[in-house]
Image (cartoon, coloured by chain):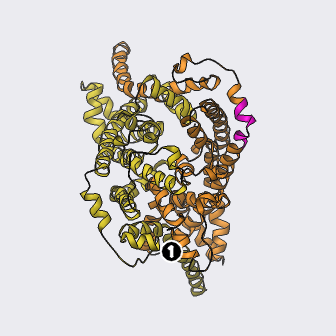
Chain colours: A yellow, B orange
């Protein structure tokens, strides 16, 4: 009986390993193709197309990227700056927003929580947002276009941080600090924030990833190619490739960026993935934690 | 004592309110002003005259939107794609979660988990590069390394719309399955092991255990997850539908969703009215659907309701 059972279980396990291996290949293959074509000698690519086993390897594409002082490098730097400034600002205002909402002695807690939460249910849509940012605040082609719209604070993050504060920071600590004469700001910075490091890391990571990966704000509000972030440069390059190959380029009057060769394009994309892959282990750790913390209760 | 406390309250509350000031101002500007701004759907928008200077034109924008058939197309695409996504997210997520849970080797399990979540963190622009490497007409991997060697004629992927529903569904599943798998895995892991022990004593095979223990116990999570996704059924993943088909006009009838329609209308002058009408339509209907689906979630499973 027992051995039979084990055999059956082994069958299920073998099936599981086979299915998951196939899924793994499907996931890794595109990344592999990107990496390999970025390492393929350009002429080989032109003649044979994207291959997993190219006839000739070459590091020319990467050499080209690192030696070029042009848009690629500056857009990469711009992405880094936007990510850094954006994450710091977003983290600050998110925590400042979340803390009072976590205080059970705060009279306006319910009403203000609802006002924050309501933004998750209803939004004005792209057109009125676009009209507001461009005609009232004039953020077009400024760095604010990358930093401010939608990314700076999400109600979802505020709610997560609020829940963390109210579940993990005993009210008695805050109360006794107040009795000892600590002001609200002092309590927040000296007592609450140091206790909230795990959630700061988690939310900071998510926000940073969102800033680094964002291309939508650039697409909406930036049309000066000298001010592109990395994602927007990538975006523009591949759009132009398609324009040119479909013969629509002249019609749209595309100007500004010369299209790099296939291998260089793939190398640029690969370079864009690197920072994300570096933080990936942390992301995975916090992501799994976040899931078990609140998203779903089994 | 109480008087003392009362005196303190205003000062304390003032400090707390001051903390909320930056975020509050941000929400007012980023969220509440645009909410009030949806009335521009009833205006004949003119950038030169600004939002307030543009003349009203009643329901004209909506008449245009609904009479051209655009509304029907973008609604159909948005709803159908989301419906397929909801079903597949559940089927794939549950299947992979159960399979992942079967794997005994901790290292192997960790490896699969790591790989599964990888597509989640790259941007849609990068995804469009990856897709292009496979689908490009002349150099693409599928044409070059699969179809040609097998003697098939190459397919011009970016102008053949019949393939796109499958391509987009595949890419969506590819990008999001790690997330749904881990979500369901959290529930699978939480199932009481003694249930399985009892079942195996009674002679149930592993498949029977999955069929009669795991799946029924996952049902609440499945229902909740699906309803939460249904709440967002009027919104689409802009990146997926805009970036991956590379803005190819030949594909619009199967790749255009409400979000891409609104964006394209906004960027091409002359269509802003229709775009605003579509955005209004999305906001209002989307809001109603969120309320309804959340109402249902709350009835079934109060803990997982949004509010």
The percent coordinates of residue A223 (x first, y second) are 42, 38
Q: Is residue A34 above or below residue A225?
A: below
The percent coordinates of residue A100 (x first, y second) are 39, 29
The residue positioned 46% from the left and 68% from the top of the image is A28
The span shown in magenta is B63-72
Of the pair A240 and A268, the residue shown nearer to us: A240
Type of secondary structure dominating the magenta stretch: helix
Residue B99 in sight: yes
Of the pair B75 and B212, the residue shown nearer to us: B75
Q: Using the image, name the chain to which the residue with label 1 belongs.
A: A
Total numbered labels placed on residues in the image: 1
The percent coordinates of residue B293 (x first, y second) are 66, 41
**Image side of residue A163 versus residue A277, left or right:** right
Residue A234 included in the magenta stretch of the image:
no
The residue positioned 32% from the left and 29% from the top of the image is A175
Residue B65 included in the magenta stretch of the image:
yes
10 Å neighbourhood of mark 1: few (<14), some, or many (≥20)? few
**Image side of residue B219 versus residue A69, left or right:** right
Of the pair B179 and B83, the residue shown nearer to us: B83
Q: Quadrant of residue A106?
A: top left
Q: Which part of the image, by quadrant, shows the N terminus of chain B?
A: top left
Residue A123 in sight: no
Q: Which part of the image, by quadrant, shows the C terminus of chain B?
A: top right
The residue positioned 55% from the left and 82% from the top of the image is A10
Extreme residue toward the front, this view? A250
Residue that carries the numbered disc 1 in the rendered image: A21
Q: Is residue B78 above or below residue B36?
A: below
**Image side of residue A4 versus residue B60, left or right:** left
């Amino acid at each position: 009986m027992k051995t039979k059972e084990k055999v059956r279980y082994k069958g299920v396990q073998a099936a599981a390993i086979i299915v998951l291996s196939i899924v793994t290949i499907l996931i890794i293959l595109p990344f592999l193709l990107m990496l390999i074509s970025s390492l393929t000698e350009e002429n080989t690519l032109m003649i044979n197309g994207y291959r997993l086993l190219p006839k000739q390897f070459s590091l020319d594409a990467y050499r080209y990227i690192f030696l070029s002082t042009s848009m690629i490098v500056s857009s990469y730097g711009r992405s880094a700056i936007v990510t850094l400034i954006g994450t710091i600002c977003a983290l600050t205002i998110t925590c400042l927003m979340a803390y009072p909402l976590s205080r059970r002695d705060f009279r306006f807690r319910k009403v203000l929580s609802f006002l924050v939460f309501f933004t998750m249910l209803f939004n004005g849509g792209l057109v009125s947002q676009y009209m507001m940012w461009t005609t009232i605040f004039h953020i077009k082609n400024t760095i604010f276009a990358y930093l401010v719209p939608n990314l700076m604070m999400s109600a979802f993050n505020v709610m997560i941080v609020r829940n963390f504060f109210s579940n993990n920071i005993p009210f008695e600590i805050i109360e006794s600090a107040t009795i000892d004469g600590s002001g609200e700001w002092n309590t927040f910075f000296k007592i609450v924030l140091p206790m909230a490091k795990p959630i700061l890391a988690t939310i900071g990571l998510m926000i940073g990833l969102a800033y680094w990966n964002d291309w939508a704000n650039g697409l909406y509000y930036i049309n000066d190619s000298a001010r592109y972030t990395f994602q927007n440069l990538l975006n523009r390059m591949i759009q132009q490739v398609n324009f040119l190959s479909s013969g629509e380029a002249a019609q749209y009057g595309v100007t500004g960026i010369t299209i790099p060769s296939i291998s260089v394009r793939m190398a640029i994309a690969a370079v864009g993935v690197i920072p994300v892959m570096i933080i990936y282990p942390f992301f995975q750790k916090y992501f799994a934690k976040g899931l078990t913390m609140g998203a779903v209760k089994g | 004592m109480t008087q003392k406390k009362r005196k303190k309250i205003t000062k304390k509350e003032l400090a707390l309110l001051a903390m909320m000031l930056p975020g509050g101002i941000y929400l007012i500007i980023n969220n509440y002003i645009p909410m009030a701004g949806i009335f521009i759907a009833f205006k004949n928008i003119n950038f030169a005259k600004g939002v307030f200077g543009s003349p009203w034109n009643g329901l004209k924008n909506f008449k245009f939107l609904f009479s051209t058939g655009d509304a029907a197309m973008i609604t159909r695409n948005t709803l159908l794609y989301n419906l397929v996504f909801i079903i597949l997210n559940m089927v794939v997520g549950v299947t992979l979660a159960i399979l992942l849970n079967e794997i005994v080797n901790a290292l192997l399990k960790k490896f699969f988990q790591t790989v599964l979540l990888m597509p989640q963190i790259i941007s849609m622009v990068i995804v469009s590069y990856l897709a292009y490497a496979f689908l490009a007409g002349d150099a693409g991997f599928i044409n070059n390394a699969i179809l040609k060697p097998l003697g098939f004629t190459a397919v011009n992927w970016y102008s053949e719309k019949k393939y796109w529903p499958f391509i987009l569904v595949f890419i969506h599943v590819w990008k999001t399955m790690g997330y749904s798998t881990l979500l369901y895995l959290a529930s699978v892991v939480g199932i009481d092991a003694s249930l399985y022990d009892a079942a195996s004593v009674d002679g149930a095979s592993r498949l029977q255990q999955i069929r009669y223990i795991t799946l029924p116990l996952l049902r609440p999570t499945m229902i909740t997850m699906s309803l939460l996704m249904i709440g967002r059924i009027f919104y689409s993943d802009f990146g997926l539908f805009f970036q991956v088909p590379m803005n190819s006009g030949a594909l619009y009838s199967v790749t255009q969703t409400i979000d891409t329609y609104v964006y394209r209308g906004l960027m091409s002058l002359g269509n802003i009215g229709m775009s605003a009408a579509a955005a209004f339509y999305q906001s209002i209907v989307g809001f109603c659907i969120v309320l309804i689906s959340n109402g249902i979630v709350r009835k079934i499973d109060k803990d997982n309701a949004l509010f």
